[in-house]
Image: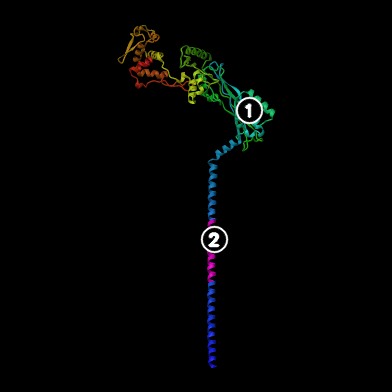
Amino acid sequence: MKKNIKKLKKRELHSNKDEKLNKSLLNRQKKNKNKAEKKLKEETKTKKYQLNKTGEISRKKRIGFTLAIVTMVFLMLSVRVAWIQFTKGDWLKQMAYLQQTLDRKINPKRGTIYDATGKNVLATSSSVETITVNPLNIASENKEKVAKKLSELFELEYEDVLKKVNKKTAIETIAKKVDKEKTNKLRVWLEEEKISSGINIDEDTKRFYPNNNLASQIIGFCGSDNQGLAGIEAMYDDELKGKTGKILKMTDAKGIDITDTTEIYEPAKDGNDLILTIDATIQGIAEKYLKEACIDNVCTDGGNILVMNPKNGDVLAIASYPDFNLNDPFTINNDEQKNNWESMSATERSNALQAMWRNKAISDTYEPGSTFKLVTASTALEEGIVETTDKEGEFCCTGYIDVAGTKMKCWRYYMPHGPESLREALMNSCNPVFIGLGQKIGVSKYYQYLRKYGFLSKTGIDLPGEATGIFLTEKKVGPVELRNHSIWSKI
């Protein structure tokens, strides 16, 4: 019994110990759990803080980056606006003006060209008109009708006119230099069809040459815009052409007329008239006989006649053959070239026309031949080497003269001229006499007179394309060259 009681007490004791141990273990586990939970909370809180902090930094970076881009774009736009304003401002202003204004030109009347008498008209201008259209001002339903009528009246291709009428441009030219008879028909048609806008009929002038071929290489001709292209027309273009007038009208961005604005009209200023030294009568006579001489003598390269007033140097006529029709300057006058015109290249055609237009008396060089003996004779008289023109026996032609060891023969070598005066020597064209005079004059003195006569420079005649004479330089002239100059011969 006592043993059992002891055993029970021991068991109770052990039981109490186990309960205490269990309680201790539970408490420890609870503490550990609390610590773990607390640690987890702290770690979670730390992570949340770190995440919040990272997000805030990222957001700040994005804001800063965005601000930097905005600032850069703003600066770039500011620079661009400043560049446009200060560098391109005037140009853009001009472009805006051109876009917003419709400018139609009015050609002036070119000045009239008269001959020396002031009565004979060599070139004049007649009044014609130019037709233009403002495609955007023509109603869509009228475009085909307008194109058809314009092509019929002015003998143009319908498709070409229709393309111009349908364009988006402000203005298109349909026909130039149109006679008023045709433009009046157009006016009547526009009135009948009640078309009041989009088709313009403006004043213009057309160059006309009453005498056709007379003085063609002197007068020259004009282009389609009344600009001088050759001869006097080109040389005095600034004086003859006048000042272009214009019609200004405001338009919107599409090129359509703004009806509330007024049309500004600036009249053209006509060109100045011109009186030449050319005498139409003398010119006509010279051309007539030159043509006959060239045909009779089969002169394939043509010919020239120049008539001057010996008292004052006025040029009274410059006749050239062949000539051309000033009213049709682009039609070739050579029969052979005319027959082959279609097969000729553009370069060949241009060369043929340039040759036809060229004034050979001005642009080409010629050997004067025995006519140059007059220069030698006048120099000898001026220098006192020859006393008078008619002293009998002053010279004696033996049929030749020695130059640098070579016999220079007279054309009458076998029948010499014998005793001669200067006048007789000129009449006989005696080479030995003038070679001898050249030797007495000498190179230096001879070249002084060549300069005085103007042979070593251009004359300055009021015609384009003047050529300079071809002479050796003074340093290169020896006895043989001086002989050649005295009689102007290459032999």
Crowd around label 2: few <14 · some 14–19 · many ≥20 (10 Å): few
| Direction from residue 374 to residue 219 in the image, left or right | right
For numbered disc 2, what is the local secondary structure? Answer: helix
Any magenta on residue 39?
A: yes
At label 2, the amino acid type is Gly
Secondary structure under tag 1 reads: helix
The image quadrant where one finds the C terminus is top left
Query: Measured from the top left, where is residue 265 in percent x and y?
Result: 62, 30
Image spot of residue 453 (x, y percent): 42, 18
Q: Does the magenta stretch include residue 2?
A: no
Q: Mark 2 points at which residue?
A: 55
Residue nearer the viewer, 59 or 481: 59
**Few, some or many C-alpha atoms within 10 Å of disc 1 (few <14, some 14-19, many ≥20)?**
many
Considering every residue shown, the one lying at the far bottom of the view is 2
Q: Which residue is drawn at 52% across and 77% down?
A: 28
- Specify whether residue 104 is in view: no
Q: In this view, does 479 lie to the left or right of 333?
A: left
Which residue is at the front of the view, 479 or 394? 479
Instruction: Assign the magenta stretch its main secondary structure.
Output: helix
Q: What stretch is highlighted in magenta?
A: 38-62
Q: What is the C-alpha distance between the residues marked 1 and 2?
A: 77 Å
The label number, if any, that marks residue 85 in the structure image: none
Q: In which quarter of the image is the N terminus?
A: bottom right
Can you identify the residue that label 1 sits on? Answer: 150
